[in-house]
Image: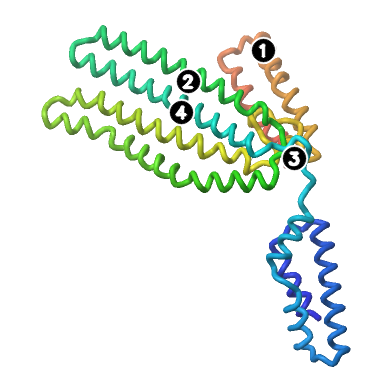
């Protein structure tokens, strides 16, 4: 009998310790024990009865499928559809490309200025520098705003188990591309100083600096672009509810993350920092200690972590 109990306990080690799983384990154990006793009454030996009970039990894969189906939570009505996830990822990819181009453009602007200055065309260099910087900063601002808008329609909506698995597959499929972009990006950044040494051999070291910024621009583009896309899949993998902004959790996401302490966390976020700002200005005006009153914010940050650890149970 102990052999059967140990066998059942071993089978259920990989499953979460929920009421449904415990109920299923007890039912299976009862069925197997009754079958074992019936076989003993038929004249089977103890070892024969145990072997037959275990062999007739079925595969572990069948048990896993049945338990996953039985313990799966009822999905809310506002669950994210797969098509919506694909659209979000496509938008994220487009915005990541724009943001990466904007940052790389700023590096190219510096390289252009230095390159033309070395040729004696300082005015043309400054003109192109400000034009490229203006375009690049505009691209960064626009795509940064699109980043925040892109996930608003999905914010605080449920991520189903099937969607989670699909996101994991997509992330796994993109992992090789991410590794290639990361390796090439880092290599280009490290090798960016090599043009300076190359032109140094011909006593034209200053010509190597614009090339260095060109290498840096490409390397930074590959690193940022690949990293943003790779991290986008985690939005559908790490949390049960989609979080568009990590600093502003929706009601469902906050409840899932903090449980019964969600209301305390929400109150703490709403009240704490406004009070700290009031204390800062009051103290500074009354004592005229503007030079060091900013330390209030440093202490407040530490104290906030202490309050969160005491009152907010994650």
Nearer the observer, disc 1 or disc 3?
3
Query: Circle 1 — which element?
Result: helix
The correct choice, above or below, for 271 with respect to 197 in the image is above
Judged from this view, the residue extending furthest toward the front is: 83
Neighbour class for label 4 at 10 Å: few (<14), some, many (≥20)? some
From the viewer's perspective, is 302 left or right of 252?
left
Q: Residue 97 carries which label?
A: 4
The x and y percentages for residue 289 are 60, 13
Q: Nearer the viewer, mark 3 or mark 4?
A: 4
Camera-side mark, 2 or 1: 2
Q: How crowded is mark 1: few (under 14 residues within 10 Å), some or many (20 or more)?
A: some
In the picture, which quadrant includes the C terminus?
Answer: top right
Q: Which is in the foreground here, disc 4 or disc 1?
A: 4
Front in this rendered view, residue 299 or 198: 198
Residue identified by numbered label 3: 256
**Residue 80 position by quadrant:** top right
Label 4 and label 1: CA atoms lie apart by: 42 Å
Q: Hey, which quadrant is residue 108 in on the image?
A: top left
On screen, residue 108 versus residue 161, left or right, reads left
Q: Work out whether residue 88 or residue 219 is closer to the camera in this orientation and state it.
A: 88
- Residue under numbered circle 2: 140
Q: Residue at x 71, y 32 (%)?
A: 156
Distance, label 3 to label 2, CA atoms, is 33 Å
Is there a contact, CB below 8 Å, between mark 4 and mark 1? no
Q: Where is residue 67 in the image (x, y as percent from the top left)?
A: 76, 59
User: Vertically, is 205 above or below 124?
Assistant: below
From the viewer's perspective, tell me whether residue 95 is left or right of residue 59: left
| Eye-nearest disc, 2 or 4 | 4
What residue do we see at 49% from left, 44% from top?
174
Tag 2, which secondary structure?
helix
């Amino acid at each position: 009998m102990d052999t059967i109990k140990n066998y059942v306990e071993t089978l259920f080690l990989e499953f979460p310790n929920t009421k449904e799983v415990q109920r299923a384990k007890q039912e299976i154990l009862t069925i197997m024990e009754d079958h074992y006793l019936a076989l003993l009454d038929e004249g089977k030996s103890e070892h024969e009865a145990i072997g037959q009970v275990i062999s007739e039990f079925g595969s572990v894969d069948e048990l896993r499928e049945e338990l996953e189906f039985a313990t799966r939570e009822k999905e809310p009505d506002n669950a994210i559809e797969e098509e919506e996830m694909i659209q979000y990822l496509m938008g994220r990819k487009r915005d990541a490309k724009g943001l990466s181009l904007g940052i790389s453009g700023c590096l190219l602007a510096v390289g252009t200025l230095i390159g033309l200055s070395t040729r004696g065309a300082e005015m043309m260099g400054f003109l192109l520098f400000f034009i490229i910087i203006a375009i690049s900063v505009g691209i960064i601002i626009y795509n940064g705003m699109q980043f925040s808008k892109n996930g608003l329609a999905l914010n605080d909506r449920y991520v189903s188990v099937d969607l989670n698995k699909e996101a994991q597959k997509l992330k796994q499929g993109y992992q090789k591309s991410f590794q290639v972009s990361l390796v090439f990006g880092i290599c280009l950044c490290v090798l960016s100083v090599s043009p300076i040494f190359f032109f140094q051999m011909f006593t034209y070291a200053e010509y190597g600096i614009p090339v260095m910024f060109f290498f840096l621009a490409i390397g930074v583009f590959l690193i940022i672009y690949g990293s943003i896309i790779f991290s986008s899949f985690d939005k559908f993998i790490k949390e049960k509810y989609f979080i568009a902004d990590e600093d502003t959790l929706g009601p469902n996401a906050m409840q899932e993350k903090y449980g019964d302490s969600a209301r305390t966390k929400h109150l703490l976020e709403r009240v704490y920092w406004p009070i700290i700002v009031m204390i800062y200005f009051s103290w500074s005006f009354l004592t005229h200690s503007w030079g060091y009153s900013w330390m209030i914010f440093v202490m407040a940050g530490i104290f906030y972590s202490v309050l969160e650890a005491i009152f907010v149970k994650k």
